[in-house]
Image (spheres, helix red, strand yellow):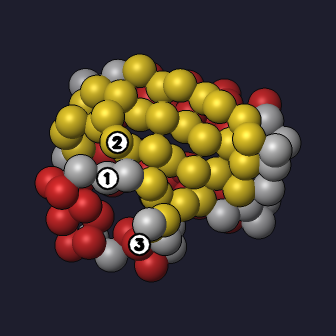
Amino acid sequence: MQIIAKKNNDTLILELDGELDQHTASYTKEVMDKHLFENSSKQVILDLQKLDFMDSTGIGVLIGRYKKMKEKNIPIFILNPSSHIDRILNMTAIYKIMPKLN
């Protein structure tokens, strides 16, 4: 898993590249939290274009980051999920809390 952080005005964009599963969850949480709390942003976009695989552990990672940002009133949005990841996110209704950008 590789996480690339970009700042665009008041938006933090985190690009996830690789697989988000039980083997990469701890690392992903640590790196995402570092970027989320070191940057003063008004919103966060998770760019999932290069995310190849995600299981239920990955869903938990995303929801955990959502909860942390919700405490700070910072919305999180999803961008560019593959069709496979999009199906998973639809089934789990995650778009109700982290809307997908078109």
**Disc number placed over residue 95 in the picture, else none:** 3
| 59 and 75: which is toward the camera | 75
Residue annotated with mark 2: 49
Residue 35, image quadrant: top right
Front label number (2 vs 3): 2
**Disc number placed over residue 34 in the picture, else none:** none
State whether residue 19 is above or below residue 85. Answer: above
**34 lies left or right of 98:** right
Q: Are marks 1 and 2 in contact (CB under 8 Å)?
A: yes
Q: Residue 37: give x, y in percent of width and height.
A: 75, 37
Amino acid type for the residue under numbered disc 3: Tyr
Residue annotated with mark 1: 81
Query: If the image is split into quadrants, where does the C terminus sit?
Result: bottom left
Mark 3 or mark 1: whose residue is earlier in sequence: 1
State whether residue 19 is above or below residue 63. Answer: above
Mark 2–mark 3 distance (CA, rounded to whole Å): 16 Å
**86 lies left or right of 48:** left
Task: Kindly identify the residue that appears in the image at 48 percent across and 26 percent down.
Answer: 3
Task: Kindly identify the residue that appears in the image at 34 percent across and 42 percent down.
Answer: 49
Task: Kindly identify the residue that appears in the image at 41 percent across and 34 percent down.
Answer: 16
Amino acid type for the residue under numbered disc 1: Pro
